[in-house]
Image (spheres, grey):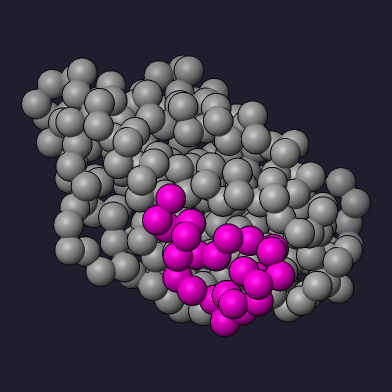
């Protein structure tokens, strides 16, 4: 097994989950409905659990730092999250669109990882499959509700949010340096196939929403190589504030 390839894949996925979990948690107490407060908080907790499990796999199989160290001590340039997840929440329409596009990608990734040659990764994929289905169902429900079943304003706002999010969403599939090894060793299906399947799924799920996928958009890459927006460092400062008070403390 190519441990460097596995670590690259897991860091990309875990960092995405960690950072988006933090963004989702920012809606707690601020959502438009009580049920949405609960839903976004629950999804954020699930994503933190996924991130921790991925950091643990890297720690055990690749010799990477333990989960807390990996999550709370790396510099911004060492983070491998896509720029998509680090963007501020903005209005609720953008957060819902990001939720939908990200979780569609996660559903594709984890479904494929059920067949991964790395047994702990495949076992984790089987374990969390039900959570992923719920996340995607929740997101698609709101895309249809506000895109097609709301009013003209809600439709226009959701379409505008989709247009803004799309180039960042494409950046989720930025190729890594170990892409060939991941595919040839059966660790994952690779980013190109993941993106193709994601686009098919998103197209299918958006049909009832009356929303249109933007055409001719170039991806905004960089995050997988450590080049981030101005929004990530303030998020990391806030996220690690308590840990940095005493990294050796046991809570």
Image location (x, y in percent) of residue 4: 73, 78
Q: Is residue 240 left or right of residue 145?
A: right
Q: Which residues are magenta?
A: 174-197
Q: Looking at the image, which residue is at 50% across and 64% down?
A: 191
Frontmost residue, 43 versus 141: 141
**The quarter of the displayed image where residue 174 is located:** bottom left
Image location (x, y in percent) of residue 144: 28, 25
Q: Is residue 86 left or right of residue 54?
A: left
Is 140 situated above or below 70?
A: above
Is 164 situated above or below 156?
A: below
Frontmost residue, 227 versus 105: 105
- Res 208 seen here: yes
Residue 191 highlighted magenta (yes or no): yes
Residue 17 highlighted magenta (yes or no): no
Q: Looking at the image, which residue is at 42% across and 58% down?
A: 195
Frontmost residue, 90 versus 44: 44
Q: Looking at the image, which residue is at 56% across and 51% down?
A: 109
Image location (x, y in percent) of residue 29: 49, 28
**The quarter of the displayed image where residue 32 is located:** top left
């Amino acid at each position: 097994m190519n441990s460097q390839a596995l670590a690259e894949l897991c860091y990309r996925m875990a960092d995405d989950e960690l950072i988006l979990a933090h963004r989702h948690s920012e809606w707690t107490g601020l959502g438009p409905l009580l049920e949405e407060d609960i839903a976004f908080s629950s999804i954020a907790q699930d994503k933190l659990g996924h991130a921790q499990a991925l950091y643990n796999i890297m720690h055990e199989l690749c010799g990477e730092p333990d989960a807390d160290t990996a999550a709370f001590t790396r510099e911004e340039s060492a983070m491998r999250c896509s720029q998509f997840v680090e963007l501020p929440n903005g209005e609720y329409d953008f957060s819902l669109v990001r939720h939908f596009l990200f979780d569609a990608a996660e559903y594709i990734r984890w479904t494929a990882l059920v067949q991964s040659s790395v047994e702990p990764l495949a076992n984790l994929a089987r374990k969390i499959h039900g959570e992923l289905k719920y996340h995607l169902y929740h997101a698609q429900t709101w895309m249809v509700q506000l895109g097609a079943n709301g009013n003209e304003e809600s439709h226009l706002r959701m379409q505008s949010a989709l247009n803004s999010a799309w180039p960042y969403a494409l950046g989720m599939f930025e190729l890594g340096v170990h892409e060939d090894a991941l595919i040839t060793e059966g660790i994952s299906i690779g980013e190109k196939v993941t993106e193709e399947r994601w686009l098919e799924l998103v197209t299918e799920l958006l049909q009832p929403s009356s929303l249109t996928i933007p055409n001719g958009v170039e991806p905004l890459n960089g995050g997988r190589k450590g080049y981030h927006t101005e929004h990530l460092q303030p998020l990391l400062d806030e996220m690690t504030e308590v840990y940095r008070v005493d990294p050796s403390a046991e809570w």
